[in-house]
Image (spheres, grey):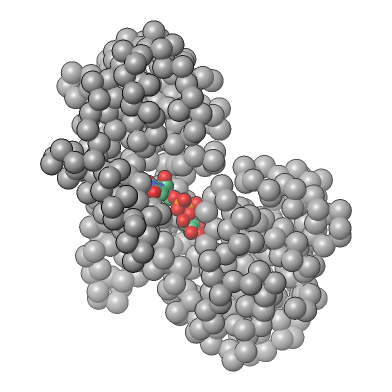
Amino acid sequence: MNAARIVVVGTGYVGLTTGACLASLGHTVTCVDVDTVKVARLSAGRVDILEPGLAELVARGLTGGTLSFVVGAAEAVRDADAVFLCVPTPMGAGGAADLRAVEDVVTEIADHLPPDCAVVTKSTVPVGTTRRISALLGRSDIAVVSNPEFLREGTAVDDFLGPDRIVVGSDTPGAAQWIADLYASLGAPSVVTDAASAELVKYAANCFLAMKLSYVNSIAELCERFGADIESVTEGMGHDRRIGRSFLKPGPGWGGSCLPKDTSALLRMSESTGFGFELLDAAIAENLAQRERIIAKIARAVGGNLADARIGLLGLAFKAGTNDLRDSPALGVASVLCAHGAEVTAYDPAVAEEQPGILVVDSAYRAAKGADAVVVLTEWPEFRRLDWHYMAESMHGDTVLDTRNLLDPDTVLDAGLSWQGIGRPRAV
Ligand code: UGA
């Protein structure tokens, strides 16, 4: 593998992970951001993102001289072999992806790129964007390449360094293979294709995962209606290698900064071609329905009236191992409870900031204090180790609603409480 000079634009969790990991593979990486404070902090080795292993990789890159942080993309790209775009593409008007950040960077760097440099999109961009960037650049000597990332928050470094696959697509002959070669030392299978196919892989994968979860949440609902147990059902399904065991855990619905945004964007993209994609539409609707069912369960647990009920929430982050609250189902549940007049107290080991309408406290026992019901919304392992006798003493009511099927029902029962999971028989 030839070491390349790489510029990464954007130091969010994708950009920073990409930059630090590419540096660890032997490339020389300059990470660019518009935020001067962030650049100064990162240059001093301060990483504010909760991502295992990332701070260590950044420190190693800084010490070894293979990683640096600067402000100003135009200057940084002057002697780059490849420029990776890792800027946000949030959900814009009407559910489509908002490409302004990508377009701004492309316009800024267009006249400063050295001849034969490659521009690589890592950000999740609508199908067709790679070709649009080419047109925007207006330079026939620059190859534009799509190289989607498949990093999960909380395991981003491991996902980068041990990927299931590398996907690279370009309409410029040879360019996709050249970018795939930057990852050669990882030994992962690579899919080298055209630009539109690479862009679509990312949406197709994330939307498939979202549909899998909506499906499993629907099956969990059926389990409750038929008196079956989702744990056995998903175990029985998961042994089938065509289905696989992962992404089969029911929960309060899927959230985070990616699945809601990407499902919505693919649906809009699909509709723009005249294809309704009803399967995906139904998966999105089912995700909202799951939240409604959880609210209804909480209401039943407190005797039907949420107004004036006290609810203790365990977990606010969209999943364990992160402090990310973007599109968190836990926050969604909390806000509906508040809107119904419930008094909501919450504890999350990674979240300390106040949230609108919710009292955020610093321990699970405080969240349980005087609660008519306690609801587990994020699968933090430490909730399994709580002293449930102490929780029971703090609570006013006796219902524990475990939307992640995280707790050991017998432990909760031993404390004199009742336990209710998702798609599992109730323990009373
Ligand atoms: C997701 C994808 O998994 C990554 O491959 C992708 O790169 C990333 O989006 C992205 O587009 O950047 P992430 O958003 O970090 O990663 O979160 P996941 O671990 O996929 O979880 C998504 C949601 O599904 C969470 O709300 C989680 O709690 C939920 N989930 C996941 C379940 O309810 N059950 C499961 O079995 C798995």
Quadrant in which residue 413 is drawn: top left
Quadrant location of the C terminus in the rendered image: top left
Quadrant location of the N terminus in the rendered image: bottom right
**Residue 18: % across, % down:** 65, 61
Is 195 placed left or right of 233 in the picture? right
Q: Residue at x 75, y 48 (%)?
A: 56
Q: Is residue 242 above or below residue 372?
A: below
| Residue 250 visible in rendering | yes
**Residue 156: % across, % down:** 59, 54
Q: Residue at x 72, y 47 (%)?
A: 55
Quadrant in which residue 149 is drawn: bottom right
| Residue 208 visible in rendering | no
Q: Is residue 414 above or below residue 105?
A: above
**Residue 115: % across, % down:** 74, 86
**Residue 177: % across, % down:** 62, 84
- Residue nearest the observer in this picture, 85 or 287: 287
Is 22 placed left or right of 28 in the picture? left
Is 355 placed left or right of 241 in the picture? right
Q: Residue furthest left?
A: 226
Q: Residue at x 67, y 42 (%)?
A: 48
- Residue nearest the observer in this picture, 2 or 338: 2
- Residue nearest the observer in this picture, 137 or 417: 417
Count every numbered label the image shows and give the total: 0
Q: Residue at x 56, y 77 (%)?
A: 190
Quadrant in which residue 114 is drawn: bottom right
